[in-house]
Image (spheres, helix red, strand yellow):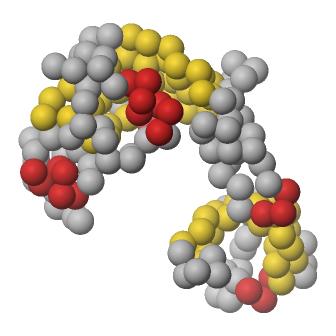
């Protein structure tokens, strides 16, 4: 069966940056599962996978522009520590969800902390990086109606317990 819209896909993967350093892998985080055609992946990666079959192995390189974009230094901002009420310990690497002006959720990562200011970075952690994927397609099958409705692959045929 070929990967096409509304197929449940399970991938074994390793993601490396342009220097070859491993950023992420299924060895650390488990297989990557998604429903093709539902905008669950970087569009360029989803396009590269279209038409491939279970058992195939492929290498895909995606430029930062087609992945998470260039870094935008204007997204780094110092915020008064008072804006984090009830959080006693803040450290570099922590992530917080805030809202954009339009009310949309926005994830920021703490990049520096002092007594008065928490410096946060709104760039995606992989912004500015060309990405290289080594992929093995473990499974391709029709996604169930429940999987399509919930927007993710259910494992071992079990119904989704949370929505």
Observer-nearest residue: 148 or 95?
Answer: 148
Observer-nearest residue: 61 or 93?
Answer: 61
Q: Residue 124, percent across and down?
A: 66, 52
Question: Which residue is located at x 10 percent, y 45 percent?
Answer: 144
| Quadrant the C terminus occupies | bottom left
Observer-nearest residue: 11 or 46?
Answer: 46
Say left or right for 144 vs 11.
left
Question: Which residue is located at x 22 percent, y 58 percent?
Answer: 150
Say left or right for 152 vs 60.
left
Q: Residue 19, percent across and down?
A: 75, 21
Above or below residue 98? Residue 47 is: above
Above or below residue 112? Residue 58 is: above
Q: Quadrant of residue 136 in the image? A: top left
Above or below residue 47? Residue 127 is: below
| Quadrant the N terminus occupies | top left
- Visible in this render: residue 138? no
Q: Quadrant of residue 11 in the image? A: top left
Question: Which residue is located at x 22 percent, y 64 percent?
Answer: 162
- Number of numbered discs on residues: 0
Q: Quadrant of residue 153 in the image? A: top left
Q: Residue 88, percent across and down?
A: 71, 80
Observer-nearest residue: 49 or 25?
Answer: 49
Say left or right for 9 vs 64.
left
Say left or right for 118 vs 99.
right
Above or below residue 47? Residue 83 is: below
- Visible in this render: residue 87? yes
């Amino acid at each position: 069966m070929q990967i096409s819209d509304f197929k449940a896909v399970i991938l074994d993967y390793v993601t490396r940056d342009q220097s070859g350093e491993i950023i992420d892998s299924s060895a650390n985080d488990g297989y990557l599962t998604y429903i093709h055609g539902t905008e669950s992946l970087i569009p360029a990666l989803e396009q590269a996978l279209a038409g491939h079959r279970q058992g195939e192995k492929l290498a895909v390189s995606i430029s930062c522009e087609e992945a998470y974009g260039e870094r935008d230094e204007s997204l780094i901002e110092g915020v008064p520590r008072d804006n984090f009420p009830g959080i006693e310990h803040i450290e570099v690497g922590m992530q917080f969800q805030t809202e954009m002006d339009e009310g949309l959720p926005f994830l920021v990562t703490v990049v520096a902390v002092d007594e008065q200011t928490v410096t946060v970075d709104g760039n995606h952690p992989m912004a500015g990086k060309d990405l290289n994927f080594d992929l093995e397609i473990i499974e391709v099958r029709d996604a169930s109606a429940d999987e399509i409705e919930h927007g993710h692959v259910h494992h071992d045929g079990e119904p989704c317990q949370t929505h």
